Image (cartoon, helix red, strand yellow):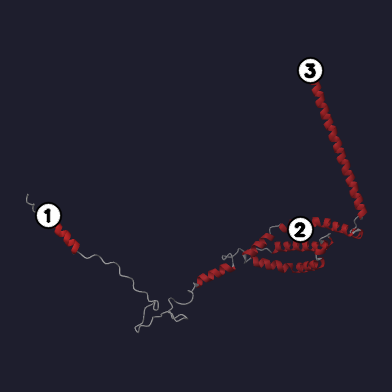
């Protein structure tokens, strides 16, 4: 049996270093300390006598208030800007513009339209009984007398308020002119129709032909129209016959040329 060789000196040193590392060596780093326990009864700490500190006072139930009571103070400049924006959609202001004249024209259109409706509306069949002619006419009389002041009020509002400016601009676009013209053009027709439905007495007051005369005139016009339609139909038939005859003659001439 061969003798055991002695250990290498380097291996012995490595073994000794490993053993020291396992049993000793530098201490491991400490982890973070545990957070202190929360004292719910004294969130701001305690006074020297041990009572809870209450820099913001106490709640109604006696507990310590964690923050100052009430809402935070608003910036006065910000509040002023908000108030201005709410009261005026265009806080920067509106450019001055005079709407007085077009508003007066628009008011005249409304007055005329309402007056025509008050006069003719009650005479219209079926729906006339729903039109309060006398009250509407009285309303239009008051409106016409107050029209200058109403136009001035809207004109003043249009200098400061964006919504009033839009309304004034819409009325000043010239729509009132053509609407008034249409009303003047339609008024004679509506008045005549209303008189027809009231009878001969109303027609006589308007110096119009009586019902029988108007009906006879319409029948005469219808007879003329029917005669015109009949003539047009006869002319169309004649043209169609002539066209068919020309086509027949052309076909016969073509056959003669082919047979020759």
Gap between marks 2 and 1 measured at Cα: 121 Å
| Residue in the picture at 87% in, 38% down | 231
The residue that mark 1 highlights is: 10
Q: Residue at x 74, y 56 (%)?
A: 178
| Residue lying at 17% horizontally and 59% vertically, measured from the top left | 18
Residue 19 quadrant = bottom left
60 vs 193, nearest the viewer = 60
Q: Which residue is mark 3?
A: 257
In-image side of 259 versus 62 (left or right): right
Quadrant location of the C terminus in the rendered image: top right
In the rendered image, the vertical position of residue 2 relative to residue 79, given as above or below: above
- Tag 3 secondary structure: helix
- State the SS at label 2: helix
Image marks 2 and 3: residues in contact by CB distance under 8 Å = no
Q: Please state which of residues 101 and 232 is positioned toward the viewer in this rendering.
A: 232
**Picture quarter containing residue 42?**
bottom left
Secondary structure under tag 1 reads: helix
Give the CA distance from mark 3 to mark 1.
136 Å
Q: Nearer the viewer, mark 2 or mark 1?
A: 1
Label 2 vs 3, first from the N-terminus: 2
- Say if mark 2 contacts mark 1, CB within 8 Å: no
User: Which mark, by number, is residue 180?
Assistant: 2
Tell me if residue 154 comes above or below residue 45 in the rendering.
above
Which residue is painted at 75% across and 62% down in the image? Answer: 110
Give above or below for 50 relative to 82. below
Is disc 2 surrounded by few (<14), some (14 to 19) or many (20+) residues within 10 Å?
some
Residue that protrudes farthest toward the front in the picture: 1
Horizontal and vertical percent position of residue 39: 38, 76
Please state the horizontal and vertical placement of residue 247, each as a whole percent of the image: 80, 26
Question: Few, some or many C-alpha atoms within 10 Å of disc 3 (few <14, some 14-19, many ≥20)?
Answer: few
Q: Is residue 176 left or right of residue 95?
A: right
Cα–Cα span, label 2 and label 3 = 74 Å
């Amino acid at each position: 049996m061969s003798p055991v060789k002695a250990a290498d000196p380097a291996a012995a040193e490595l073994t000794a270093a490993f053993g020291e590392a396992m049993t000793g060596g530098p201490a491991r780093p400490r982890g973070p300390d545990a957070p202190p326990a929360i004292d719910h009864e004294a969130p701001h700490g305690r006074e020297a006598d041990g009572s809870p500190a209450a820099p913001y006072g106490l709640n109604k139930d006696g507990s310590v208030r964690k923050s100052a009571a009430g809402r935070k103070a608003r910036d006065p400049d910000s509040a002023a800007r908000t108030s201005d924006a709410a009261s005026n959609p265009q806080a920067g202001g509106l450019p001055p513009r005079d709407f007085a004249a077009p508003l007066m024209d628009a008011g005249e259109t409304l007055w005329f339209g309402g007056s025509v409706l008050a006069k003719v509306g009650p005479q219209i069949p079926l729906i006339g009984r729903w039109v309060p002619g006398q009250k509407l006419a009285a309303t239009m009389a008051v409106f016409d007398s107050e029209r200058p002041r109403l136009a001035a009020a809207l004109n003043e509002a249009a200098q400061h308020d964006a919504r009033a400016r839009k309304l004034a601009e819409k009325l000043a676009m010239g729509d009132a002119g053509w609407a008034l013209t249409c009303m003047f053009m339609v008024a004679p027709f509506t008045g005549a129709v209303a008189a027809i439905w009231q009878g001969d007495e109303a027609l006589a007051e308007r110096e119009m032909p009586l019902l029988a005369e108007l009906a006879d005139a319409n029948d005469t016009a219808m007879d003329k129209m029917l005669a015109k339609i009949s003539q047009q139909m006869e002319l169309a038939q004649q043209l169609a016959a002539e066209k068919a005859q020309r086509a027949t003659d052309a076909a016969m001439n073509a056959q003669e040329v082919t047979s020759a």
